[in-house]
């Protein structure tokens, strides 16, 4: 029976990856005549092979790619021989497109690493080998290309292979096959080349047809993440999903994670029929013996070997966005069919993709790979990536732009969730607030420097104090000099600064106080994260909405002038962004209203429950 | 069903279920062709015993083969799903037709523009389409979940990374996601699956004697009396079939004697030209599909 091999081609730019795939398509007779006539037109216009046909143009599908003769995005190509069906991910070699390469690797079982014989091993060769290994690819073919340019020199081929061998052992590939080829001329692609009498191994296509990529006996039993609850009538309740591992048959005992309820498989529903059993890779619908609480994101697993559950993980993460991943920031996490809010609690180290060395890092920029700790807002079912790709891989999505900004692989659960038990005590927040006769709240003042945050907050605190309220003010002066004196003004430090302030404010609210926080806090994501740490109604965002030109005119400390002269960097409003709140509870206009009026407005809002945004727009 | 077709099927069903689970208001494009037939079949399998929880949408240019429309109405009724049909009546009233307008402008107005009107009117946030990556070079670069800006535009340089089987369908109001469950199928897979699953398809895919005229080296079928014949031109009867189906004046037939699925499969495997060769709209310029897709075409 014919099977499918999914593989990726990778390697440094200009090593001939696209030409190699073009050659495979060409030789397996997958190029249609009308594509060929378009190719001839394109070759004359964009080609790099003079009048001859440029096979790379068969796969470089975007206009920008043809114009620049480079691959930008991953392309998927299909071809077949009588032995096997192939899906190829052709991926870019440029370092700035590493993320596209990782995308192609995530669904591949084998990698063809292309090396330019005339240039030898490059930084990207090492990077790509490490990335494909990290993404779980266990089989590597090294196509030493452009051998014609070095006169088919056996010694040169041998040297490249010897230099690379230590990495093969270090990354523990299960199979490794180096092949001397010329993609341009078709040597050792499908037919054995007369130029390499010294080479006795397979041609590239022979190798791809024969390599066995079946995973070694999988010890994981049945697991299926629920995608959809199918409930067309009162009598039918089916759970739909694709089996991640193991096998299942009618009558099997299963456990649902989270929840831990045990039940039995009543039936496996196929198309207009019922199935006795199903296995990994099948998309099925199952019905259970008992009514169990199951939603999208639950995992149904063999009762004897259920899936793990945790809310703290150590993971490898690849940054996919030009906005760096920083500790303390929260993201939406898609882990199989489960969605949670995830926070990177710490970046343990960055991995140097060339050497594998660990580097200290406070943030991860585009294409950086790091090992991080992640916490989720609730326990989620998972398996370590190396045991199960499907249940161990996740993406991080930016909460504001909705872009996919990170890709992660879970290494293990930190199991802290199981070890931390909050002391249930009778002296709690509500007891403390009853004692003080006040509702604890955090008033979060945000706005540009010199917008009037502290002026308003100071007067407000006096008025509250006079009225017998227990208050506390957190601002740059009392926090930056003590608790946060180790932090600077880089983006990572600003995020950490706000995170610590948030946690202190939360403790003070727990103590029953009215807390006034006065920080520029320029990023929406951090303010939203702060909000998420409080109970509903406990967090009041006060936007001191003073225009930049007014603040700059006021400039009581001369900071704007300094920033304009370039003496202060990362100054909000000048060379660092301020993201205004979209719907703050309170918006203050300090241009048209006095400080007294602003304070009146806040007090009125506090007394009247703050359910709605009361600002006059 | 052979191993690789079963795994293609399982992957497509997974994609369709993800799409529906992540969308507020999904819709499935139904173009009546073989790929739509397979996609609809997969959707019915994905949600069996319930009918698929979304409507079908057909963009009718009024120039489809008559047989296609009859087939559409029958299949929609059988599936138990709601069928939405949209035509760009404003352009019809302005006299737009595939004969006096070049194929590029005709397609823009009657298909792309009409599609955007229908999607806006229905406020659909997720649209399932039957495109495959093996059809055309720019399609080979497209994600399975493909983000569209508020104007339905595709920006090939701003595609979201798509790793594993994890899809990101999060959007702002007005934006949308197009989802292609058949991304990893080839034309040969489609035919083999139709054969294995006994999926009904329009008779035009099978060879039969049909009235055709020769235009620019290709056989065009004269499906009704709106077809303007050149002076002295008379349709001749030839045994032909169609590898793809679209607007009849823009879809060329191939000479063939394949009257069974098995013969079609055999012919497809031996084919030396791509199926879209019969689509006159693809040949306008080298990057023509990429450009149409950026503007919102499927």
Image (cartoon, rainbow, N blue to C red):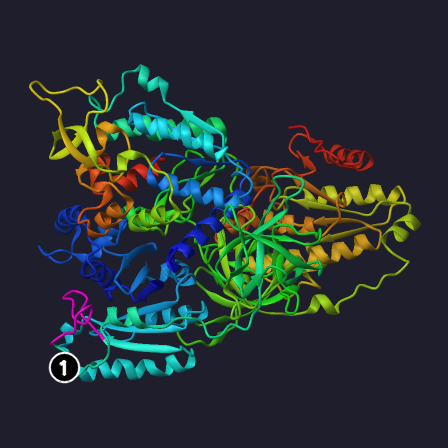
Residue at left offset 30%, top offset 37%: B292
The answer to whether residue A402 shows anywhere in this view is no
- Looking at the image, residue A316 lies above or below residue B177: below
Is A128 left, or right, of A498 in this rendering?
A: left
List the residue tagged with mark 1.
A197
Question: Of helix, strand and loop, which one carries label 1?
Answer: loop
x, y (%) of residue B32? 36, 34
What is the chain letter for disc 1? A
Q: Residue furthest top?
A: B93
Residue at left offset 71%, top offset 61%: A260
Q: Give the position of the N terminus of chain A as an image quadrant.
A: bottom left
x, y (%) of residue B20? 52, 42
Q: Residue furthest right?
A: A435
Residue B79 or residue B110, whichever sits in front: B79
Q: How many numbered markers are drawn?
A: 1
Q: Does the magenta run of residues contain A260? A: no
Residue A237 or residue A274, whichever sits in front: A274
Residue at left offset 53%, top offset 35%: B25
x, y (%) of residue A246? 54, 66
Q: Does the magenta run of residues contain A182? A: yes
Residue A508 or residue A563, whichever sits in front: A508
Q: Main secondary structure of the magenta part?
A: loop
Q: Give the position of the C terminus of chain A as an image quadrant.
A: top right
x, y (%) of residue B43? 47, 43
Is A114 left, or right, of A232 in this rendering?
A: left
- Looking at the image, residue B72 lies above or below residue A158: above
Residue at left offset 43%, top offset 38%: B149
Using a 10 Å C-alpha cutoff, classify the residue at mark 1 as few (fewer than 14 neighbours), some (14 to 19) or many (20 or more): few
Is A612 left, or right, of A24 in this rendering?
A: right
Which residues are the magenta region?
A180-194
The answer to whether residue A492 shows anywhere in this view is yes
Quarter assignment of residue A204: bottom left
């Amino acid at each position: 029976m014919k099977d499918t091999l999914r593989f990726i081609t990778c390697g440094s730019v200009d090593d001939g990856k696209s030409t190699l795939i073009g050659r495979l398509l060409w030789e397996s007779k997958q190029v249609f005549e009308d594509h060929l006539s378009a190719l001839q037109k394109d070759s004359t216009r964009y080609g790099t092979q003079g009048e001859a046909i440029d096979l790379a143009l068969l796969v470089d599908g975007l206009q920008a790619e043809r114009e620049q003769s480079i691959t930008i995005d991953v392309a998927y190509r299909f071809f077949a021989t009588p032995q096997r069906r192939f899906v190829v991910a052709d991926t870019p070699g440029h370092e700035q497109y590493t993320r596209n390469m990782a995308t192609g690797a995530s669904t591949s079982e084998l990698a063809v690493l292309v090396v330019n014989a005339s240039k030898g091993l490059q930084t990207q060769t090492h990077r790509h080998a490490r990335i494909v290994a990290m993404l779980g690819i266990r089989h590597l073919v090294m196509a030493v290309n452009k051998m014609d340019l070095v006169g088919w020199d056996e010694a040169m081929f041998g040297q490249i292979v010897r230099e690379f061998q230590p990495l093969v052992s270090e990354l523990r590939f299960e199979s490794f096959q180096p092949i001397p080829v010329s993609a341009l001329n078709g040597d050792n692609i499908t037919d054995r080349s007369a130029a390499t009498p010294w080479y006795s191994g397979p041609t590239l296509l022979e190798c791809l047809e024969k390599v066995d990529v079946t995973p070694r006996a999988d010890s994981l039993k049945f697991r299926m993440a629920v995608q959809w609850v199918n409930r067309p009538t009162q009598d039918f309740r089916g759970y739909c999903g694709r089996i991640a591992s193991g096998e299942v048959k009618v009558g099997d005992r299963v456990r649902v994670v989270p929840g831990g309820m045990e039940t039995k498989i009543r039936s496996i529903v196929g198309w207009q029929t019922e199935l006795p059993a199903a296995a990994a890779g099948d998309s099925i619908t199952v019905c259970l013996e008992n009514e169990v609480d199951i939603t999208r994101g639950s995992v149904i697993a063999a009762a004897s070997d259920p899936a793990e559950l945790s809310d703290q993980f150590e993971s490898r993460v690849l940054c996919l966005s030009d906005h760096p991943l920083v500790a303390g920031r929260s993201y939406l996490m898609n882990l199989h069919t489960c969605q949670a809010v995830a926070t990177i609690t710490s970046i343990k180290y960055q991995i140097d993709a060339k050497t594998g060395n660990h580097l200290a890092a406070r943030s991860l920029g585009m294409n950086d790979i790091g090992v991080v700790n992640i916490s989720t807002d609730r326990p989620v079912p998972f398996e370590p990536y190396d045991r199960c790709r499907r249940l161990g891989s996740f993406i991080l999505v930016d909460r504001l732009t909705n872009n996919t900004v990170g890709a992660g692989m879970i290494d293990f659960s930190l199991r802290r969730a199981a070890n931390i038990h909050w002391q249930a005590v009778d002296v709690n927040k509500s007891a403390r607030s009853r004692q003080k006769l006040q509702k604890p709240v955090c008033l979060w003042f945000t706005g540009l420097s010199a917008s009037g945050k502290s002026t308003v907050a100071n007067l407000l605190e006096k008025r509250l104090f006079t009225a017998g309220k227990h208050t506390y003010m957190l601002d740059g002066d009392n926090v930056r000099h003590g608790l946060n004196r180790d932090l600077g003004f880089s983006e990572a430090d600003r995020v950490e600064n706000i995170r610590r302030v948030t946690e202190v404010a939360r403790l003070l609210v727990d103590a029953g106080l009215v807390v006034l926080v006065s920080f520029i806090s320029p990023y929406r994501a951090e303010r939203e994260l702060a909000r998420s740490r409080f109970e509903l109604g406990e967090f009041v965002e006060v936007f001191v909405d003073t225009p930049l030109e007014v603040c700059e005119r006021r400039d009581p400390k001369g900071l704007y002038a300094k920033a304009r002269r370039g003496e202060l960097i990362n100054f909000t409003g000048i060379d660092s962004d301020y993201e205004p709140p979209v719907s703050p509870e309170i918006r203050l206009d300090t241009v048209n209203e006095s400080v007294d009026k602003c304070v009146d407005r806040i007090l009125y809002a506090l007394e009247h429950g703050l359910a709605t945004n009361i600002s006059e727009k | 069903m052979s191993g690789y077709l079963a795994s293609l099927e399982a992957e497509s069903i997974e994609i369709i279920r993800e799409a529906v689970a992540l969308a507020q208001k999904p819709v499935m494009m139904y173009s009546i062709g073989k790929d739509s037939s397979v996609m609809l079949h997969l959707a019915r399998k994905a949600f069996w015993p319930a009918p698929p929880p979304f409507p079908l949408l057909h963009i009718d240019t009024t120039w489809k083969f008559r047989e296609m429309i009859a087939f559409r109405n029958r299949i929609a009724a059988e599936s138990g799903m709601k069928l939405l049909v949209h035509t760009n009546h404003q352009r019809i009233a302005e006299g737009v037709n595939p004969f006096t307008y070049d194929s590029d402008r005709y397609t823009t107005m009657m298909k792309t523009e009409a599609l955007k009107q229908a999607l806006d009117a229905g406020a659909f946030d997720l649209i399932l389409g039957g495109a495959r990556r093996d059809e055309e070079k720019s399609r080979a670069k497209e994600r399975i979940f493909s983000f569209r800006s508020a104007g339905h535009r595709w920006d090939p340089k701003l595609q979201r990374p798509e790793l594993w089987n994890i899809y990101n369908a999060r959007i702002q109001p007005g934006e949308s996601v197009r989802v292609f469950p058949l991304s990893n199928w080839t034309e040969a897979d489609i035919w083999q699956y139709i054969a294995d699953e006994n999926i009904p398809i329009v008779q035009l895919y099978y060879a039969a004697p049909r009235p055709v005229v020769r235009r620019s080296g290709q056989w065009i079928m004269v499906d009704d009396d709106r077809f303007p014949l050149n002076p002295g031109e008379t349709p001749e009867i030839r045994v032909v079939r169609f590898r793809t189906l679209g607007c009849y004046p823009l879809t060329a037939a191939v000479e063939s004697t394949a009257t069974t699925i098995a013969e079609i499969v055999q012919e497809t495997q031996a084919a030396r030209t791509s199926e879209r060769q019969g689509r006159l709209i693809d040949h306008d310029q080298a990057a023509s599909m990429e450009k149409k897709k950026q503007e919102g075409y499927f």
